[in-house]
Amino acid sequence: MATVFSRIMLGTVQFGLEYGIANVAGKPSFDRVCDIVKTAFEGGVTALDTAAAYGTSEEVLGAALERLGLREAMAVVSKVPPIPDGTDAEAERFIEHSIRGSLQRLRLDRLAVCLLHREDDLRHLPLLEKMVERGLIAGAGVSLDSDRFLTEAANVRYIQLPYNVLDRRFDAFWSVAIQKKIYVFSRSVYLQGLLLMPEAHIRPSLSEVIPVRRDLETVAREAGCTMAELCMRYALSNPAVASVLTGVDTPEQMRENLRVAAVGPLPARSHTGMRTRLARVARPSGVVGAINLTPRGYAACGI
């Protein structure tokens, strides 16, 4: 039986690392993590995203799910770290060892989905799929950072990728995803908070995004919604997206995300018009000015 993923997926990297452009408080306490997960579940969220590479995220999340009695209620997606060079046999052992470690830390018997964390490891997908046969995971896929592997991705069941109002790199992929019934988990809906944080708090290395944000604010006003609603509803309006992944630092932020998501997708007519309007703001390559709005681009900006 296929796993059913909620339309909103809670990202948990911030449970194990000080993560996010707008994050000034650091990692939340364990009690706060429990409150966030509880708030998410009570709001209808039944899918969680983590990774072995996210610091102590898996350990913290596993302990929280056990305290809350939600181990069986949540579909957990985790990821295999970059696979070292070597033989297929060595790669297979690495993958299995990584997954067993994740399961131990998460206090689970099986992952709903396990993704290859590095897109360049996509060639190892058949080895990851062996873990389905061994009962360690229910589904296998890949996390993409770019559009370099879209041809290969057309044959992958589960894909996580960056998608937001500024990023048009995957536009050619959506019809393929729908046709082939690929589960797409979209992340970076708020660009790690960059699209929502006060303008005065944007660091100088990212100042070129400010005029773009102002254009987006105009689009939001014309649509009669807030920036948060514009970003979330735009992602929810894409029929190819199974779940929109979003991370929070507090239960209050979780409730706000749930409120925004509850407004639902944009009306079809509004969505079409907004895509035309946003095309003047977004860049197909994901580049706004001199800033590459991808994880590698953030690193280049000293983030």
Image: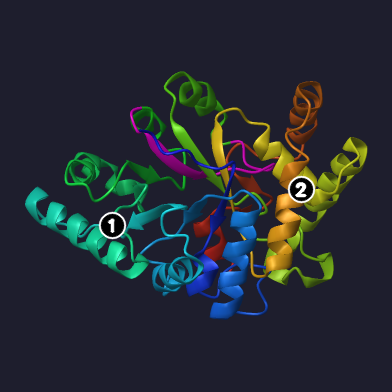
Of the numbered discs 1 and 2, the one sitting upstream in the chain is 1
Q: Residue at x 47, y 72 (%)?
A: 67
Quarter of the image where the C terminus is located: bottom right
Q: Secondary structure at mark 1?
A: loop
Q: What residue did someone put label 2 on?
A: 260
Up the image or down, 71 lies above or below 61; here it is: above
Q: Residue at x 50, y 41 (%)?
A: 5
The residue lying toward the viewer, choosing from 115 and 297, is 115
Would you say the residues marked 1 and 2 are in contact, meaning their CB atoms lie under 8 Å apart? no
Amino acid carrying mark 1 in the image: Asp
Q: Secondary structure at mark 2?
A: helix
Up the image or down, 82 lies above or below 227; here it is: below
Q: Is residue 127 left or right of residue 232?
A: left
Amino acid carrying mark 2 in the image: Val
Question: Which x, y percent locates residue 35?
Answer: 62, 70
Magenta span contains residue 161: yes
Q: What residue did someone put label 1 on?
A: 109
Q: Main secondary structure of the magenta part?
A: loop
Question: Which x, y percent locates residue 34?
Answer: 56, 71
